[in-house]
Image (cartoon, helix red, strand yellow):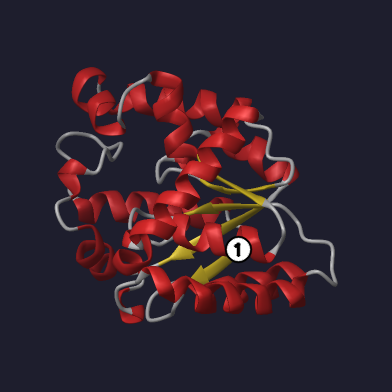
Amino acid sequence: RDIITLLSQQFVHLACVSGVLAHECFPQCGAVRQDDYHHIDRTINHSAGKVHTMQSPLSNIVGMPGSGKNTVGIVLAKAAALAFVDTDLLIQSHSGESLQNIVDGYGYEALRRVEEQVLCDLDVTGHVIATGGSAVYSERAMQQLKSNSVIVFLDISLATVRHRIGDFSLRGISKHPDQTLDDLFAERRVLYTRYADLIVLGANKTQDQVCEEILRGLAS
């Protein structure tokens, strides 16, 4: 738990200092400056006031790279008064290597095996979890997550994925070497839909709008 908490704190710090995630996944918001976080805090706290009146279920966010899982997860965790965990960081901590190095050195199936182990060992109590895009390839891991949390699928179009992630060959994505982004998108979307308890469309919305839509879905 201490490692999870530390990684969560480090990730939130990096996201707040750079604003890179919010700008990449929600470009309509514009670049995030340091002094903008006073406004973001007020917005999040406004959402948090709405959710404190109910029992918030734990959430695991799934979706394609570029869907905004981490950005939305941080906002959602604060609004629901929960901690946040990015499982990609846990994988890197567990293996001592970046996702891209794992794929390059050992193959995409090795990354999926490590990811499955990390997910199955994860204690989700009191956390919002942003899983890696390939988490849905593990039936074992997904069933375990579904047994004690709500699976939220952030659904965006292939065109949006392509626009947001650019050169996906450098993203540490778990895929067959000959698989195109189009094929990967089609393959994964079936799996995301299969496991999802809640599907939220992520395109053309700010991170706060997506977060509030998730909160409404969790409360219904």
Please name the residue that numbered disc 1 is placed on: 76
Give the structural element (helix, strand or loop) at label 1.
helix
Residue type beneath disc 1: Leu
Residue 114, visible in the rendered structure: yes
Q: Is residue 76 above or below residue 112?
A: below
Taking the view exactly as shown, the residue that stands out farthest to the front is 35
Please name the residue shown 68% across and 39% down the image: 124
Q: Which image quarter: residue 15?
A: bottom left
Q: Which image quarter: residue 111?
A: top left
Q: Position of residue 17 (x, y in %)?
A: 38, 57
On the picture, is 163 further left or further right than 203? left
Of 26 and 118, the residue lying toward us: 26
Q: Position of residue 148 (x, y in %)?
A: 74, 43
Q: Position of residue 89 (x, y in %)?
A: 43, 36
Please name the residue shown 53% across and 23% down the image: 117
Classify mark 1: residues with Cα within 10 Å, few (<14), some (14-19) or many (20+): many
Q: Is residue 66 above or below residue 10?
A: below
Q: Quadrant of the C terminus?
A: bottom right
Please name the residue shown 54% across and 43% down the image: 8
Of 24 and 166, the residue lying toward us: 24
On the picture, is 51 further left or further right than 215? right
Residue 137, visible in the rendered structure: no
Of 197 and 211, the residue lying toward us: 211
